[in-house]
Image (spheres, rainbow, N blue to C red):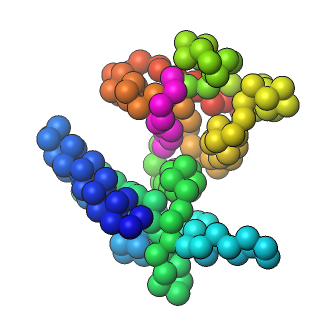
Amino acid sequence: LCTMIYAGLINKNLVASFYKNGKKAAGLSGADFNCILSTKRNHPTINYGMVGDVEHVDAEILGDFVAKNVIPVLCSVTLSKEGELLNTNADTIASEVAKAMSKEYRVHLIYCFEKNGVLTDITDDESVLKSISQKEFNQMKETKQIADGMIPKLQSAYKVLFHGVEEVRIINSAHLKSYFNAEHPGTQIILH
């Protein structure tokens, strides 16, 4: 079901949307061309099922698409060395692909979700931080201003900045167009 929805319905709808806007795109999963290899998550007491953790991203294959002006649209299904299809965290895939591609390209990683960015007050959608440093993140985590799913998102953001990604930003998906119009929506993640 996960493969049908992510690699099928959602992925192909995104490809169709790019086409409608005059762009060429290819809908891929990590299994296609073996471009994202993962290992099945193993825990001594918890059975995670078919959940994967990224081991390797083949930046050369993705770069071939970019060189042909084709946007690779990746879903969160990856492949194990044993040929198993694994459900893998989409934020992790985005950060691992960004890291791999930053060796050859200028990469900006944009996390899109339903909030306007990193908020100082989770109940106030307008309390968006323009930027957040690693030190500020650690302080806000201690005071519980930042919690739940935002923690791993920000942790992976700082990690990719250390690995050569030029910019990381967290924005509302509705503001993506304004980002590409050289505006600065949401929150920029900075090291210092």
- Up the image or down, 8 lies above or below 81; here it is above
Left-right relation of 70 to 138: left
The range drawn in magenta is 107-116
Left-right relation of 120 to 143: left
- Point out residue 165 in the picture as x, y percentages from the top left corner: 57, 43
- For residue 72, what is the image quadrant? bottom left
- Up the image or down, 188 lies above or below 10; here it is above
Q: Observer-nearest residue: 158 or 15?
A: 15
Which residue occupies 84% across, 26% down?
A: 143
139 is within the stretch colored magenta: no
Which residue occupies 38% across, 67% down?
A: 1
- Up the image or down, 94 lies above or below 184; here it is below
Q: Observer-nearest residue: 124 or 96?
A: 124
- Point out residue 144 in the picture as x, y percentages from the top left corner: 79, 29
- Up the image or down, 133 lies above or below 85; here it is above
Q: Observer-nearest residue: 67 or 11?
A: 11
109 is within the stretch colored magenta: yes
Which residue occupies 79% across, 76% down?
A: 44
Which residue occupies 55% across, 25% down?
A: 117
